[in-house]
Image: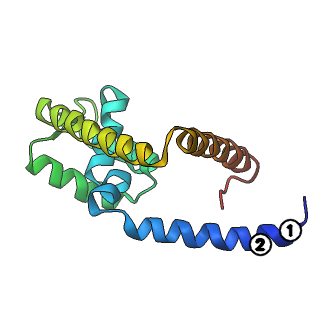
Amino acid sequence: MEDAEPYATLAHELFESLDRLGHRLTPVARNSLHGETAVMWTLSRAGGSLMPSELAATLHVSSARVANILRSLEKKHWVTRQHSLIDRRRVTVSLTEKGEDICQQREAQRNQLLISFLSKLGKEDSRELVRILRKSCTIIGAREQKETQVI
C-alpha cells in the first residue's frame, strides 16, 4: 500500500463530506434508500413478487422494518400480500397496478432531480463522479467477496 499518511487525511475529509451529504438528503431521498420507495423499486425490478425476507435481505433492513413498510403500502393499496396455497405461512408481496404507477412517477421524479444535480456539476465532473462511483463499487465488491464484510 502507498504511503498511508495522505490517505488518512483524505479518509477524514471523505467521511466528513459523506456525513454532510447524508444530513442534507431530504426525507424523500432517505425513503428511496430504505423506505417505501426502496421496497417498491425492489419489487418493480424483481418483475413479480418477493417474500418479505427477500426484501429485507436485499435492502439490508430488519424484517420488522419491512413488515412496517408493507403494512403502510397495503393501506395505500400499493402492494398486496398473497399466502401460498401449499404453505399458508409463506407470503409473497407484489405491487398493485396503482403501486406500479406510483413507482413510475417516483422514478421520473428521481431522474429529474439527478439530471438537475448532474447539470449543475457539468458534463466532465458528472462523468468523473460516475466513473469514481463505479470504481468504488468494484473495489468494495471485491473486498466483500474476500472478507464478507464491507467497511
Relative height, residue 19 to residue 109 (above, below) = below
Vertical comparison of 85 with 117: above or below? above
Q: Position of residue 96 (x, y in %)?
A: 15, 33
Numbered tag placed on residue 4 in the rendering = 1
Marks 2/1 in contact by CB < 8 Å: the verdict is yes
Which residue is pictured at 67% across the width and 74% down the height? 12
| Left or right: where 142 falls relative to 37 | right
Which of the pair 84/76 is nearer the observer?
76
Q: Secondary structure at mark 2?
A: helix
Residue 52 visible in the current orientation: yes
Q: Position of residue 81 (x, y in %)?
A: 19, 40
User: Which quadrant does the C terminus fall into?
Assistant: bottom right
Camera-nearest residue between 68 and 106: 106
Residue 9, image quadrant: bottom right
For label 2, the crowd category at 10 Å Cα-Cα, with few meaning under 14, some 14 to 19 and many 20 or more, is: few
- Left-right relation of 33 to 17: left
Name the residue type under label 1.
Ala
Q: Is residue 34 above or below residue 16?
A: above
Q: In the current view of this chain or complex, which residue is farthest to the top?
A: 47
At horizontal 13% and vertical 29% (from top left) the residue drawn is 97
Query: As shown in the figure, which amino acid type bears the numbered disc 2?
Result: Ala
**Helix, strand or loop at disc 1?**
helix
| Quadrant of the image occupied by residue 130 | top right
- The foreground one among 85 and 143 is 143
Residue of label 2: 8
Q: Position of residue 15 (x, y in %)?
A: 60, 70
